[in-house]
Amino acid sequence: MNTSHSERLIVQEVAPRDGLQIEPTWVATTDKIALVDGLSQAGFTRIEAGSFVSPKAIPALRDGEEVFRGIARRAGVTYVALVPNLKGAQRAIAAGADEINLVMSASQTHNRANMRMSCEASLAGFGEIVAFAARHPVSLNATVATTFGCPFEGRIDEDRVLEIVAHYLALGIPNVTLADTTGMANPVQVRRIVTRALALLPASALTLHFHNTRGLGLVNVLAAYEAGARRFDAALGGLGGCPFAPGASGNICTEDLVNLCDEVGIDTGIDLPHLIAMSRRLPALLGHEVPGQVAKAGRNCDLHPVPAALQAA
Amino acid sequence: MNTSHSERLIVQEVAPRDGLQIEPTWVATTDKIALVDGLSQAGFTRIEAGSFVSPKAIPALRDGEEVFRGIARRAGVTYVALVPNLKGAQRAIAAGADEINLVMSASQTHNRANMRMSCEASLAGFGEIVAFAARHPVSLNATVATTFGCPFEGRIDEDRVLEIVAHYLALGIPNVTLADTTGMANPVQVRRIVTRALALLPASALTLHFHNTRGLGLVNVLAAYEAGARRFDAALGGLGGCPFAPGASGNICTEDLVNLCDEVGIDTGIDLPHLIAMSRRLPALLGHEVPGQVAKAGRNCDLHPVPAALQAA
């Protein structure tokens, strides 16, 4: 594993969006703003700070405008918003998002379940959004959900995934996220797909989004890193989850990922103690434990006192 | 990743010992026997079925004799017992253990805390046990606890770990486990230490024991496998744990490991659906949820029905 600075691993923090969207407890706008600002202070350069979807579809994130307007913008940080359609893109740009993230599933069935439209309709909508966004200072990213498997259809044809990536690029969307929406990826598959994707776009434009649903989130991060990927989504505390796997973990946990990077000498630029302190406040904010491990166990260097009985011996 | 049969990964199931030893709820002897027998039916060839320690030290496992005598021995399965001293070895051999596993920490402080003696005293005791065991049809394994880090001392000198391995071999103990007792290992360190250990003993005699305390258990398994290791401890449901990391995960979870192997084409010989069914019975047996993910999420091939609204469309 190369540890030179050029090998920095970029973590895009998605807890304010992908983490909070399924929380049943309402998180106050001021708490959301404090979360985003705490993350920018911890050293993140990319934060998915909210979404602009129908408040009926995702009531937990209905205050996207107030969050984007309330955060203390930090220089060098890209604040990203997820949007489902042109109206969402218009709202996100008006609220000051630096980047908008579009999403379509490689699986037709999942796209119909998640976005309530066919893949063809999604792509047509993307075209409208690209045309609108071109008149504004905003960058574009599009996600291929269920890249590594679909809970309804199972394995997804890899050629189809790569064709979608090429289609996004041809539409004028330069940045792409490959998402393991329900945690079905394995490291052999990840190496293969990442290698193929990096033939189409540079590492600086490719994000991998893994879930830890079956315990393989960090395994897949390392496999993708070794294949050349350098940008990864992760959520503080491992927030998020999947309605098809009750009790299972959600997004890979940011502090667990940063701890791994610190231990093996991969630079992330993120302040791990700050992150752990933030994660430890999540149970009080959300009313439940969160899946992350390092916030419970501490770092390796957080040593325990030698038992008194041994000191006396 | 080579997927030929010679690359089989051997899982030694340790839930009946390392898993149950810290459980506050008493597990009836008949339930322990059913657990061991269920594991042998699932295809494990190595099961750590109990320990022969002082019932005051570990009351949860005070029925070691009854468990070993009650199990339905399956041909080809090695039933292992952990023992702390000569008396324990005598009890284990009398009860019919096929293999006894000795343990000493690489860290003096941890050995005093865990075994209540110096490393020198541990090694002297191992000599007595080897001499006794030589007169009986039993094989020997010794564990180097805290190989990858100590919660009191921090990093452990790798030369010291390798010297202990060489010392075990010189004592006449042919099989060695390198244990990450409190989940401090990282994959770069694992590759380095496994490579060095495999210069001293064959892969068939080396076991890696990882905990998932900081979320890196399966990452470390793959790193060790890629470095040539082929035998791994794991516990059904991810049972076990560490008194220094309340709330954190314990041993790596067997069904999560077997799922990983199935997905990437590494043969284990273990029946995953059988294992998942066993894991799903653990919460009722123990009175709490367990950390494993795959038992909650199901396998990738356990697809979800397409929502009725979409079928109608």
Image (cartoon, coloured by chain):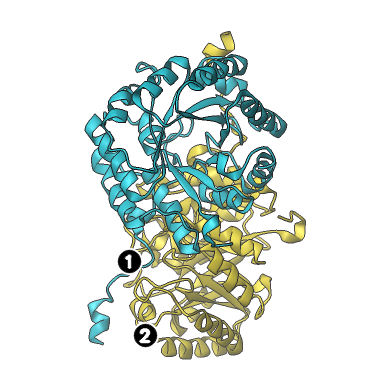
Chain colours: A yellow, B cyan
Which quadrant is the C terminus of chain A positioned in? top right
Work out whether A13 lies above or below B18: below
Work out whether A169 lies above or below A265: below
* Residue that label 1 marks: B302
Q: Which chain does the numbered disc 1 sit on? A: B
Q: Which chain does the numbered disc 2 sit on? A: A
Dividing the picture into quarters, in which one does residue B49 lie?
top left
Work out whether B42 lies above or below B174: below
> Viewer-nearest of labels 1 and 2?
1
Q: Residue furthest top?
A: A313
- Image location of residue A138, percent across then percent down: 60, 78
Q: Is residue A211 visible?
A: yes
Q: Are marks 1 and 2 on the same chain?
A: no
Dividing the picture into quarters, in which one does residue A177 lie?
bottom right
Question: Which sits in the foreground, A135 or A221?
Answer: A221
- Image location of residue B244, percent across then percent down: 49, 30
